[in-house]
Amino acid sequence: MTLTTRAHVLVCPKRLVPRFTDLTADETSDLWLTAQKVGSKLETFHNASSLTLAIQDGPQAGQTVPHVHIHIMPRKGGDFEKNDEVYDALDEKEKELKQKLDLDIERVDRSIQEMADEASQYRSLFDC
């Protein structure tokens, strides 16, 4: 199995900084508390039994987008043949994300309606 875009969520701090160590103590706390809340809701929403939370902090760690973000991936038993294959899938998603952010590469965006539908589904999980 590969990670699906719908089940793979990124959580970012409001202030964009390149590295995790650039965050203030309050920003670090807010980032992880938000990841905890989002992860809990996604795990329930996707009928998962676990979560993988990951930060790739710096180019040698696999970071391809130059701002801090936490990957949250709901997990189910057997979703990967070998559990650590999730990190290979994560690397692929990082590469895809970098390409999507490159405005010189032609791509087909999801429609506004598709993005609105997905946001609406996730928004319903929170008190918004």
Image: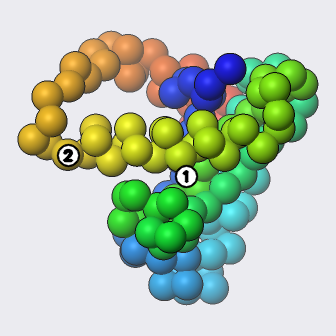
Q: Quadrant of the C terminus?
A: top right
- Structural crowding at the residue carrying mark 2, measured as other residues with C-alpha within 10 Å and reported as few (<14), some (14–19) or many (≥20): few
Q: Is residue 41 visible?
A: no
Q: Position of residue 90 (x, y in %)?
A: 58, 43
- For image coordinates 33% across by 47% down, the residue present is 98
Type of amino acid at the residue the image marks with label 2: Asp
Q: Position of residue 56 (x, y in %)?
A: 56, 62
Q: Position of residue 44 (x, y in %)?
A: 81, 27
Element class at badge 2: loop
- Would residue 82 be found to the left or right of residue 9 on screen? right
Residue highlighted by disc 2: 102
- For image coordinates 69% across by 64% down, the residue present is 32
- For image coordinates 62% across by 42% down, the residue present is 88
Query: Quadrant of residue 38 in the image?
Result: top right
Q: Is residue 75 visible?
A: yes
Query: Do the numbered discs 1 and 2 sit on residues whose CB atoms are within 8 Å?
Result: no
- For image coordinates 61% across by 61% down, the residue present is 55
Q: Nearer the viewer, residue 84 or 7?
A: 84
Element class at badge 1: strand
Residue highlighted by disc 1: 11
Classify 3 as above or below 11: above
Q: Position of residue 27 (x, y in %)?
A: 57, 76
- Would residue 101 be found to the left or right of residue 25 on screen? left
